[in-house]
């Protein structure tokens, strides 16, 4: 037989390719969801056109696939070659005179192709994507300025004005029942303006608010008892909308370093100096390093598998994960040393590159690891099982077997749990590495940045788990039943008279339990963790600048508007607020009845309790008069001060329901309802994904496993894509929130039931 064979190379290529594609797709989708979450505020808080939303969605892809392709190569090579080794195919090849070099040819080819692809993405795709993201953000801001006031939402983006509109038509730009708070710092005056109708007129860079049937009350800050009230049939207020600045930024050709290609970055670095030059050089080198990483990881995967015993697949995956973490930690360490000036930027990039080459060479040249000969996950599990069943004493496992249907359920459940935990650990590690790699350019340049980043990643863990849990369950289900199928266990069980549906019963019961656990984590840990991790992320990205907690918060509740300063975002009922102003409106919601001002207050036991003397202004006969007020509080069934927490990911199920119930904004209402239904769906997602995944894992033919795996991944991708499209349609108002969330779940539940009925039982 020839030393180098095209057939052998093709066979190895075909063995690795499916697992590489599966891993690449899985990681890319999961990280894409994480990246999309970063821009959820832009997509959900602004009614931007759908084409901008889709542009932003597409722009997130290059960065994700450039990062996940090297990882997918490493995992795909390890799983593919380990499968060949487990089936004794590697032994047969070596017995025929085929060495590691021949086996590595296909692996190297995959690495070279993906490295070329990485260069293309980093040369063109990543810069173009960054340009699109910036342009979409500016166009969204410009779109919002065309009709800046949305019913039911406070707007403080117009310089000097805080505007609240209870009703109106966003498309036509017509408002009804308007409240405007204007602070004139130069003249030390505050104006309260109410009006029946209004709009904003824009021409070029000039804009003005036009109000019909307006009432204006002016307070003198030096003497609050000095009040002037007037009624105006038509009032025009000039405002600065920064429209010209946005248009100028859109028309500029100057680009940030993230928007430049490799050659442009190199040229840009030469005209800079100091830390700016270092940052640009690090960015250039990072793209080069990411481009050649697929080839390095392909060689590393082949080298690792060459040292395994047949029972060492699990150990190989652990080694792959450890290799990934060490590689990217070395890359981050090199960047940090370059930023501090300890080493040059060139040397910083060579640290992970040279280290990888040394390890690869050592793995190929050296003898097999002693640990891989003596420690094998498969061997350990087989020895434990043998010792346990041979023992005469009654063990907890034996008791379990006696009380239930037998070893079958226990074996399936243990394998499902083991594969699920391994998948969760692997995906979580990739998620953390990607996030750390993304934020290091901010955290690495500030004092205490490492501590802040570690704290952020810790509070990010609940979010990561909820995001990856359904996909991890899909992988665990496929891995468990496909391995059973390859080992002919499913054939044996069905030949013994067991129905396929009986084999799936433990899996479905486990999915229900996991769904319940996930729902509990979502309600009791996720919301508070999201608040903390978002605050830490903002602090890191702002380079350790403290978040301003002294800003004024505005909340509308029935016929009241509240203005206050919130020391924190806690929803504790005893939270104290300062500089509280309570505006009470008439039933028509267009005229102010009274204004209460108090320096310190809190909500407790269904009332707002005043902790300092209050001043009350009452409106009568078109005028406002200051009254002495000895009242120590006013009734309030719900706490108005916790409504400053408006981000859906910061709200639990009860809080989200309340926001949806009391929202006056159609767009905001849709956002909260979609979030509400998605929170309910968390408990059902594991079961539904398993329902349409399991049929593909129960192939009774060993030859069809790769094909059925591809079908399962395709259905999963279709489910993820359909859910995203329906959610976007629901956010845009084309579908009801109920239909946007539950329709995909219902469709794929029916599909799963249909696929189950097609299984040979």
Image (cartoon, rainbow, N blue to C red):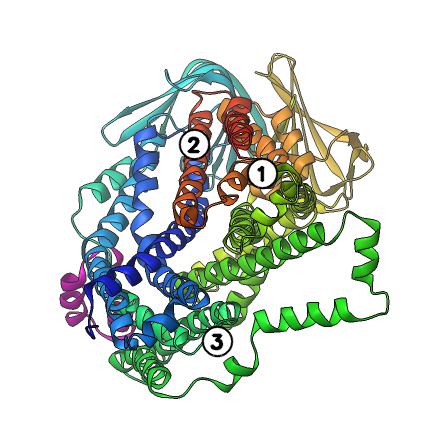
- The image shows residue 686 at horizontal and vertical percentages of 59, 41
Question: Badge 2 local density, few (<14 within 10 Å), some, or many (20+)?
Answer: some
Q: Quadrant of the N terminus?
A: bottom left
Return the disc, 2 or 3, that comes first in the chain's sequence: 3
Q: Is residue 48 magenta?
A: no
> Mark 3: which secondary structure?
loop
Closer-to-camera residue (348/142): 348
Closer-to-camera residue (47/375): 375
In the rendered view, tell whether residue 20 sits above or below residue 624: below
Question: Badge 3 local density, few (<14 within 10 Å), some, or many (20+)?
Answer: many
Q: CA distance from mark 2 to mark 3?
A: 42 Å
Q: Is residue 259 magenta?
A: yes
Farthest bottom residue in view: 366
Return the disc, 3 or 1, that comes first in the chain's sequence: 3
Q: CA distance from mark 2 to mark 1?
A: 14 Å
Of badges 3 and 1, the one in the foreground is 3
Please identify the quarter of the rendering in which residue 174 is found. top left
Closer-to-camera residue (270/435): 435
Q: Is residue 602 visible?
A: yes
Image side of residue 368 versus residue 300, left or right: right
Residue 309 is tagged as 3
- The image shows residue 512 at horizontal and vertical percentages of 67, 41
> Mark 2: which secondary structure?
helix
Q: Which residue is mark 1?
A: 685
Residue at 35% from the left image edge and 78% from the top image edge? 334
> Mark 1: which secondary structure?
helix
The stretch in magenta equals 258-281
In the rendered view, tell whether residue 93 sits above or below residue 149: below
Q: Is residue 568 visible?
A: no
């Amino acid at each position: 037989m020839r030393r180098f064979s095209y057939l052998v190379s093709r066979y190895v290529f075909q063995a690795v390719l499916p697992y590489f594609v599966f891993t690449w797709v899985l990681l890319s989708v999961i990280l894409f969801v994480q990246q999309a979450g970063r821009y959820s505020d832009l997509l959900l808080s602004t009614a931007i056109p759908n084409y901008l939303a889709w542009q932003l969605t597409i722009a997130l892809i290059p960065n994700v696939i450039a990062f996940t392709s090297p990882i997918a190569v490493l995992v795909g090579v390890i799983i593919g070659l380990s499968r060949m080794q487990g089936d004794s195919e590697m032994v047969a090849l070596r017995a025929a005179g085929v060495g590691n070099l021949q086996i590595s040819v296909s692996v190297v080819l995959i690495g070279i192709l993906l490295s070329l692809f990485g260069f293309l993405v980093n040369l063109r795709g990543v810069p173009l994507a960054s340009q699109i993201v910036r342009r979409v953000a500016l166009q969204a801001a410009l779109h919002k300025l065309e009709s800046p006031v949305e019913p039911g939402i406070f707007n403080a983006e117009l310089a000097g004005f805080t505007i609240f509109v209870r009703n109106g038509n966003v498309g036509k730009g017509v408002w009804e029942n308007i409240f405007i708070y204007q602070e004139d710092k130069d003249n030390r005056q505050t104006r309260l303006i109410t009006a029946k109708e209004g709009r904003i007129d824009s021409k070029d860079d000039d804009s003005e608010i036009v109000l019909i049937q307006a009432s204006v009350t002016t307070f003198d800050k030096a003497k609050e008892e000095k009040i002037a009230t007037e009624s105006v049939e038509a009032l025009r207020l000039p405002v600065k909308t920064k429209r010209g600045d946005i248009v100028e930024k859109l028309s500029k050709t100057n680009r940030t370093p993230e928007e430049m290609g490799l050659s442009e970055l190199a040229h840009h670095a030469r005209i800079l100096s100091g830390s700016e030059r270092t940052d640009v050089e690090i960015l250039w080198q990072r793209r080069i390093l990411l481009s050649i990483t697929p080839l390095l990881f392909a060689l590393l995967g082949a080298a690792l598998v060459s040292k395994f015993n047949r029972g060492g697949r699990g150990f190989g995956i652990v080694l792959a994960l450890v290799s990934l973490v060490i590689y990217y930690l070395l890359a981050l360490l090199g960047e940090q040393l370059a930023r501090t000036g300890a080493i040059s930027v060139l040397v910083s990039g060579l640290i992970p590159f040279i280290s990888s080459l040394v390890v690869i060479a050592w793995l190929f040249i050296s003898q097999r690891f002693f640990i891989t000969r003596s420690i094998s996950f498969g061997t350990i599990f087989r020895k434990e099982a043998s010792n346990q069943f041979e023992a005469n004493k009654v063990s907890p496992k034996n008791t379990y077997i006696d009380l239930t249907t037998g070893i079958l359920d226990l074996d399936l459940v243990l394998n499902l749990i083991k594969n699920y935990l391994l998948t969760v650990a692997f995906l979580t590690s990739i998620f953390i590495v990607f996030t750390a790699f993304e934020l290091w350019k901010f955290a690495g340049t500030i004092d205490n940045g490492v501590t802040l980043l570690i704290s952020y990643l810790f509070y990010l863990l609940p979010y990561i788990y909820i995001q990856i849990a359904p996909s991890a369950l899909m992988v665990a289900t496929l891995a468990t039943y496909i391995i059973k199928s390859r080992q002919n266990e499913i054939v044996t069980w069905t030949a013994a008279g067991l129905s396929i549906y009986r084999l799936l019963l433990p899996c479905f019961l486990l999915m229900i339990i996991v769904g319940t656990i996930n729902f509990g984590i979502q309600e009791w840990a996720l919301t508070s963790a999201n608040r903390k991790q978002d605050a830490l992320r903002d602090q890191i990205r702002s380079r350790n600048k403290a978040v301003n907690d002294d800003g004024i918060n505005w909340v509308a509740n029935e016929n009241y508007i509240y203005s206050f300063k919130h020391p924190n975002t806690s929803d504790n009922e005893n939270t104290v607020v300062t500089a509280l102003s309570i505006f009470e409106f008439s039933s028509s919601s267009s005229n102010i009845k009274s204004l209460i001002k108090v320096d310190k207050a809190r909500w407790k036991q269904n009332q707002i309790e005043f902790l300092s003397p209050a001043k009350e202004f009452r409106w009568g006969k078109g005028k406002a008069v200051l009254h002495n007020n000895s009242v120590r509080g006013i009734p309030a069934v719900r706490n108005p001060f916790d409504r400053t927490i408006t981000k859906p990911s910061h709200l639990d199920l009860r809080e989200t329901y309340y926001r949806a119930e009391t929202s006056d904004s159609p767009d905001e209402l849709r956002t909260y309802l979609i979030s509400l239904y998605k929170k309910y769906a968390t408990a059902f997602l594991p079961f539904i994904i398993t329902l349409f995944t399991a049929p593909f894992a129960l192939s009774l033919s060993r030859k069809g496993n790769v094909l059925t795996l591809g079908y399962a991944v395709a259905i999963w991708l279709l489910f993820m894509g359909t859910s995203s499209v329906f959610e976007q349609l629901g956010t845009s108002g084309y579908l009801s929130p109920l239909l946007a969330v539950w329709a995909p779940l219902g469709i794929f539940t029916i599909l799963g039931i249909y696929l189950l009925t097609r299984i040979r039982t």
